[in-house]
Image (cartoon, grey):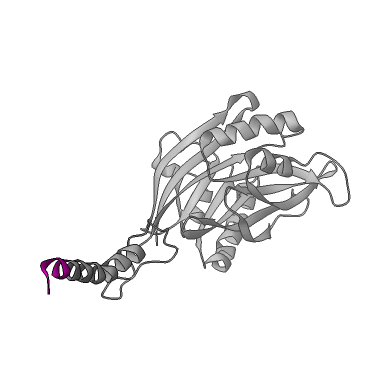
Amino acid sequence: MSRSVMKKFFIDAVRISMIPMLLFGLFSCGGPKETTQPSVSALGEKKSLRTAAKILSVNLAHSVKDRADAKRVAAWIKSTGAEVVTVQQIEVPGEGKQGFNAVRELATLTEMYQFFGKARYLEGFDSGNAIFSIYPVRQSTVVQLPVSKGKVRRSLTYGVVDIGLLSIGIGTTELDDQSAAERAVQVQELLKSSASFSDFHYFITGAMYESAGGAVASGLGLKFELANATSNGAAALTQHIYAPKNLKITATDVKSVQLKEKKLDGLLVSYQIME
C-alpha cells in the first residue's frame, strides 16, 4: 500500500471515530432549561427549591371611583414592583348593573390577573376585597366572616398563585373597624378556615384595624408570623401581612409605602420561600 493511500485511510478512520463524540456533544450541550420539578440527587433526595414573592397589601377605602383614580393607583402599584397585590374596600357593579368597574380597570392598567370577592352591597355596587397578580389566580373562593346583627358584612377573598416554581395561597380581608370583640370572633374564623387552605403556603393580608401589638396579631400568631413585627417602620400599621409559621419562609424586606395624593398606606413585603 502506498504512503498516500495509507494516509487517506488513517484520516478517514479518525473522522469516523469522531462521529459518536460529535453526536454526544450535540445532544448534551444544549442551552440551560428552566426546571419545573425538584431535582433529585444520586442518593434520591430532593433538592430544595427557592423562590421569591413580593406582596403589597392596601386598603383603597372606596377611593377608586373613575379611570383617573385607577390610573393613579395603578401607576403607584407598578412603581412598588409588587408581584401580588391584595386590596380591600374596592367596588364592582352589582349583577346586571352598569357602572365603573374598579377591579377590571386596575387589572387592565397594571396588566395583572384579578379575582374579586364580595363582602357587602354598597351604594349600588358590590364592595369587597380583590387579589391582583402578574401570575394567574386560581382555586379562588370567598369565605364569609361572622358579624353580629346590624354590623357591616365582612369576607375573606382567597386564591392560589403560582410564583415561579412554587404555588402559594393568599387571602385578603377587612376586619371590623369598631369592635375588638368582633375582630376576635373573625380571627377565630380565619384560623378555622386556614385548615382548608393547607395544601399551599398560606398568607393572610388585610386591614386589621390594630397595630402589630394588638389582639389580632396575637390571635393569628398561633399559626402565622406577622411581617410588621420585624420592622419598626411597619409595626404601627393597621395593614398586616402574615406568613405561615415555617422556617423555610423569610421576610427579607418589610416597609410602609404611601400614595400621598390619595392618603393611602400600604404594606410591601418581600419573601424568600424554600420548598
Majority secondary structure in the magenta region: helix
* Residue bounds of the magenta highlight: 1-7
Quadrant in the picture for the C terminus: bottom left
For residue 97, side relative to residue 154 (left or right): right
Residue 205 in the image: x percent, y percent? Answer: 56, 49
Between 263 and 135, the one lying in front of the other is: 135
Q: Residue at position x 30%, y 63% from top? A: 25
Q: Residue at position x 71%, y 55% from top? A: 147
Residue 56 in the image: x percent, y percent? Answer: 54, 42
Q: Is residue 212 visible?
A: no
Residue 218 versus residue 255 in the image, above or below: below
For residue 130, side relative to residue 6 (left or right): right
Between 238 and 63, the one lying in front of the other is: 63
Residue 195: quarter of image: bottom right
Residue 203 in the image: x percent, y percent? Answer: 52, 54
For residue 54, side relative to residue 77 (left or right): left
For residue 100, side relative to residue 263 (left or right): right
Residue 226 versus residue 14 in the image, above or below: above
Q: Residue at position x 30%, y 68% from top? A: 24
**Residue 177 located within the stretch drawn in magenta:** no
